[in-house]
Amino acid sequence: MKIATWNINGVRARIDNLLHWLKESGPDIVCLQEIKTMDDGFPRLEIEALGYHVETHGQKGFNGVAILSKLRFDEVNRGLPGDEADEQARFIEGVFSTEGGALRVVSLYLPNGNPVAEERKFGYKLAWMERLERWAHERLALEEPLVLAGDYNVIPQPIDAKNPAEWVNDALYQPESRGALRRLEYLGFTDAIRAVGDDQLFTFWDYQGGAWQKNNGIRIDHLMLSPEAANRLAAADIEKHVRAWEKPSDHVPAAVQLALS
């Protein structure tokens, strides 16, 4: 089973690219971030025509996450628990039945956190990551394959940036941000892309400064696997070529293949 994540940076603006990629790549489950639309504005008919079930957690103009699946949803949960005052649409969980049992997949969009000096920005990012850690710890007790897929807005290691020095003052590369992601690994989650190799790979290239042409990228889109999912990991890759398409997102898809039968 192929599970992919992609920060689409506006689903209505990239619908042609999305439909082309779905046909080309053929993922079974897709986690989208930054759909930037309310639920009723999501272009579900075009996607459903390709055989996908669609669940969204939208927000007007920014944020917003979605899961597209060739499998029917058994359960859908919207919003990361732990802060009832948090109205930002950054989290959606889908539960599916497979030949190998239940599968849980989350599409998440972590806060950017910049500027670091602002508590309402960087503090919100760290608090969100603490809530994610608590939630993930509880889900691990179910001992089911679980994939936490999305734009984490965290550069895990120096190898995950073409020029790490450019990011030392950025929220994406702060010790606190990187430490929060490591704590997920300490819980038992596996970074799927890193599990299959130690090459320098990127998922994001800024629109400015010729970043794509210079390959000045960073890796901030991750698929974190529970032990039960990691045991079924067959392959993982980043579909970099999508960044060269017309009207691209500044992110590209990353995907894993899980042997769930």
Image (tube, rainbow, N blue to C red):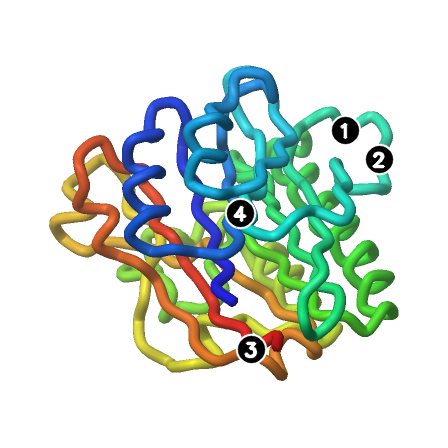
Instruction: Decide which of 93, 34 is in the foreground and name it.
Output: 93
In the depicted view, which residue is nearer to us: 256 or 48? 48
Residue 164 position within the rendered picture, expressed as x and y whole percent measured from the top left: 35, 60
Say if 61 sits above or below 8 in the image: above
Q: Nearer the viewer, residue 14 or 134?
A: 14
Q: CA distance from mark 4 to mark 2?
A: 23 Å
Q: Is residue 207 left or right of residue 1?
A: left
Q: Residue at x 74, y 44 (%)?
A: 127
Task: Please indicate whether residue 224 sits to the left or right of residue 145 in the image.
Answer: left
According to the picture, the residue beneath numbered tag 3 turns out to be 259
Depth check, mark 2 against mark 3: the one in front is: 3
Cα separation, mark 2 vs mark 1, equals 6 Å
Residue for badge 4: 31
Q: Are marks 1 and 4 in contact (CB under 8 Å)?
A: no
Between marks 4 and 2 in the image, the one whose residue lies nearer the viewer: 4
Neighbourhood count class around disc 2 (C-alpha, 10 Å): few under 14, some 14–19, many 20 upward:
few
Residue found 62% across the figure and 69% down from its top: 225
Contact? badges 3 and 4 (CB < 8 Å): no
Q: Which mark is residue 86?
A: 1
Q: Would residue 19 be found to the left or right of residue 131 on screen?
A: left
Is 127 placed above or below 85 here?
below
Ranked by sequence position, the earlier of labels 3 and 1 is 1
Earlier in the chain: of badge 1 and badge 4, it is 4
Helix, strand or loop at label 4? It is: strand
Within-10-Å neighbours for mark 1: few <14, some 14–19, many 20+: few
Position in image of residue 245 (x %, y %)? 18, 41
- CA gap, disc 1 to disc 4? 21 Å
Q: Position of residue 158 (x, y in %)?
A: 39, 68
Identify the residue position indicated by label 2 in the image: 83
Amino acid type for the residue under numbered disc 3: Ala
